[in-house]
Amino acid sequence: MTFEEALAIVTTALAPQSLSDLQTNVFRGAWNKDSYQKISLKLNHEYSYIKDVGAELWQLLTQRLGIQVTKLNLQTVLTQYAQQGQIHSPVGLQQRSRVDWGEAPDVSHFCGRRAQLAVLEQWIVQDRCRLVAIAGTGGIGKTMLAAQLTQQLVDSDQFEVVVWRSLQQAQPLVDFLTELLQALCTRDFVETTPDQSDSSRLNAMMRQLLEQLRRQRCLLILDNAEAVLCSELIGTYRPGYEDYGWLFQQLGEGRHQSSVLLTSRETPTEIAIQAGPAAAVRLLRLDQLSIEEGKAILAVKGLPVQTEQGQVQKLIERYQGNPLALKLAATAIQNLYGSNIAAFLAEETQLFKDIHDSLAHQFDRLSLLEQQVMHWLTLHREAAIAAQLQVNLLSSAAQVELRNTLTESSVLACWGNVSNTQQFAMMEYINKQLNEQVCQKVN
C-alpha cells in the first residue's frame, strides 16, 4: 500500500473531519517509519509537540476505525483494514514482532528475578533506554534473565523486530555486523564490497545499523559480550576486537528509537562511562538469588525443599545463590546421593567436574592482580576490607589499582569498609589449585 492510498483510507474514516497539514505531515513521517525526532527536525517543531500530535492522531484513528492504532503498527493495521474491510475487533490485527531467537535459551522453567525483571522492563519500555547492560559472574543467570525479559517483551508486542545474537564465538566485527544487518533488514540491506577498506566497510555498516534502529523499534540482544574482552585489563578488548568498543559506544550514544540488551561478566569501558540512573544507558549488576528463589530452582530440579528446609538453606548459602551452581549441585545430589542433601553437604568437597570447569574458565579470565587477591582471601579464610588487602597483599601497589580491581571484578565484593569474601565454590577451586601446585613442586 502506498502512502497516498493509506491517506485516502484515513481521510474517508475521519470524514467530515479532516487532517490538518501538520497531522498529515506527521502521518507521512510515521508511514515512512521516521522517528518522532526526525519528524520534528523536518517540520521544525519541538520533539515533545510532534509526539503529542502523533499520540492524538493515533487515538483518533483508533476510535474511528475500531482498531488499536499506534505509530509502530500503522502500516500493518491500515493494510489489513483495506484488505478485509471495516473490522470491529482488533484481534489478530495488532502488529506481531518479527523475532529471530538466534542462540537464546528456553525459559519455560524460569524462576525468580521478578524485581530485576520489573526494573529492566521499566528501563526499556517506559524509559526507552537505548542500551541496557546486565553484568555479573558466570552462572549467576544473566542470559536466562535476558531471555525471560525478551519473551515478555515479545508477548506484549513492544517491538517490531527482535534479534538475539551471542558474541561467544567472538567474530571479527565486520563479520558480526554483516550477519546482524541481514537479520535486522528484510529488504534494504546493502552488503559492502570486499574491495573497500576495513574502516570504510565498518563505517558503512554502522550507518546502516543505526538507520535501521531509527526506522523501526528494534530489540537487539547481545549475549556473552565478555568473549571480546581482554582478561588482562578490566573493561578493555582482546587484540583485534577493539572495534567492538566503538559498536557499544555508538549503540549507547547514537540517536535511535530501539533498545539494545547486553549481557557480560565484565562491563565494557564505554558502557561504564555512559551508564547512569537517568541516562539512556543503564547497568544492572546481578547479585545472588534469595533463599526463596534458590528453593524454587531446587524444587524444579526435584529436590525435597519442603521436608529439608534447613539443609536446603545451607545448600543455597554454600553456593552463594548461584543458579548454575545450584542446578549442577541438584543434579549431583539426585544422581550420586539419592536426593539426600545432608549427605551431600557432609562431604568435605563438592567441587564436581561441571562446577570445576565453570570456575576454571572464570579464574583464567582474571587479571594477575585479581588472582593474587583471590589466593590471599582463600588462604586467610576470613573477610577482609580493602585496607587489609593492601597492607597484607600489595603494600607497594597503588591504591587506585587495587580499588579498580575490587570495584570491577565480577567475583569480588565492593571497595571500602565492606568485607570482601570468597564464594565457597571458588575457595574450593583455588584450594585444589594451590594443592596441585604444592604437589608439583614436591615431586
Image (cartoon, helix red, strand yellow):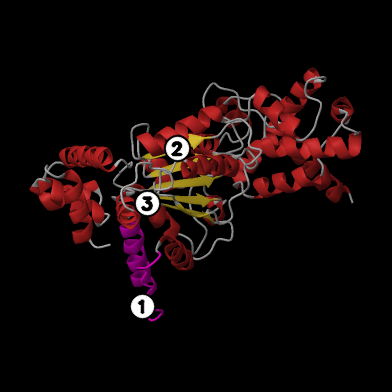
Residue at image position (37%, 68%) is 189
Above or below 189: residue 363: above
Please provide the residue range marked out in magenta. Answer: 186-212
Residue that protrudes farthest toward the bottom in the picture: 195
Residue at 49% over, 42% down: 155
Left or right of 70: which side holds 51? left
Classify the position of the N terminus by image quarter. bottom left
In the picture, residue 83 is in which quadrant?
bottom left
Q: Secondary structure at mark 2?
A: strand
Q: Position of residue 205 (x, y in %)?
A: 36, 66
Residue 283 is marked as 2
Query: Which quadrant of the view contains residue 157?
Result: top left
Name the residue that disc number 3 marks. 251
Indicate the position of residue 275 as horizontal and vertical percent values. 39, 39
Is label 1 in a helix, a strand or a loop?
Answer: loop
* Residue 342 locus on image (x, y percent): 87, 25
Residue that mark 1 sits on:
196
Residue type highlighted by circle 3: Leu
Q: Residues within 10 Å of mark 3 (few under 14, many from 20)?
A: many
Number of other residues with Cα within 10 Å of mark 2, as a class: few under 14, some 14 to 19, many 20 or more: many
Q: Residue at x 67, y 23 (%)?
A: 291
* Amino acid type for the residue under numbered disc 1: Gln
Marks 3 and 1, the one that precedes in the sequence: 1
Relative side of 205 to 336, left or right: left
